[in-house]
Amino acid sequence: MLLGIETSTKNCSIALFKDGVLLGAHDERGDRFVHGERLHVMIQELLHEHGAIPKDLSGIIVGEGPGSYTGLRIGTSTAKGLAFALNIPMYAVPTLGCFDFSSFESNYCISVLDARRDEVFAQVWHKVSGGFEASGPIEAVIVDDESWGHLREESVTVIGDCAEKMAELLSPLPAHWTIAPTAFPSASAMHTFLGPNLAPVDTAYFEPFYLKDFVAEKSKKKYL
């Protein structure tokens, strides 16, 4: 039994898999991060729902990023703690692949996560027999009407957590492009990575893939 953890956005997400099949998942999100408060409780609840205990787990899968620095640190530290405590392997999968692409009929998909201002974290996926596979590197892209120019004549679906922003920045939208409703990466979509190519990471030395350096925000609180 594998436990998936995806916390790179405001969506705090976990899932249980057995023999490559999704058993169940929990997703919680709000205007602020609930990860620190809810992640361990969600894991306990999901295991209980399926009559399992932590010792039943054979591995932990974590969304490696990019995304929120805080969210990634919480998810990674939780995954490491469980992997060490249970003496089981830890795996990492790209956050930008943790979307449900199954209903898309387009030849390409661009998954995006808001990186503030006019920028997104993005990866292009190409439709192949049985699903979508990565067709390029994970990049930080400043979005304008010339972005992904090589795909302008292709059928493309854009999915991510900033649909309104993408619709505005890509205006006018190319003829064969569609922007899917706002969606967040979810641990439930990690099943697409399960298979012989999923290799464990070095739990002790693994670090999330931030893509950009962490920038601390100035506190908005007023102090006397």
Image: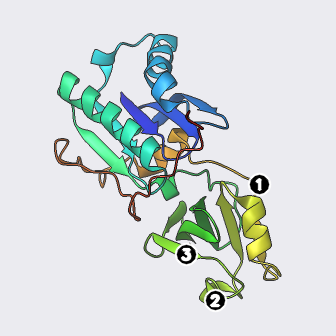
Q: Position of residue 160 (x, y in %)?
A: 64, 57
> Is residue 117 shown above or below 99?
below
Q: Which is closer to the viewer, label 2 or label 3?
A: 3
> Is residue 179 shown above or below 47?
below
Q: CA distance from mark 2 to mark 1?
A: 22 Å
* Amino acid marked by disc 2: Gly
Residue sitting nearer the eye, 113 or 196 = 113
Q: Position of residue 200 (x, y in %)?
A: 23, 46
Q: Give whichever of discs 2 and 3 has the lower sequence position.
A: 3
Report how many numbered discs are placed on residues in the image: 3
User: What residue lies at 20% left-to-right and 42% top-to-bottom?
Assistant: 203
Q: Please tell me in which quadrant of the rendered image residue 159 appears.
A: bottom right
* Amino acid marked by disc 1: Pro
43 left or right of 56?
right
Q: Which is closer to the viewer, label 1 or label 3?
A: 3
Residue sitting nearer the eye, 45 or 52 = 45
* Amino acid marked by disc 3: Val
Q: Secondary structure at mark 2?
A: helix
**Residue ID for mark 1:** 181
Query: How many residues crowd mark 1 within 10 Å: few (<14), some (14–19), many (20+)?
Result: few
**Residue ID for mark 2:** 149
Q: Secondary structure at mark 3?
A: strand
**Residue ID for mark 3:** 141
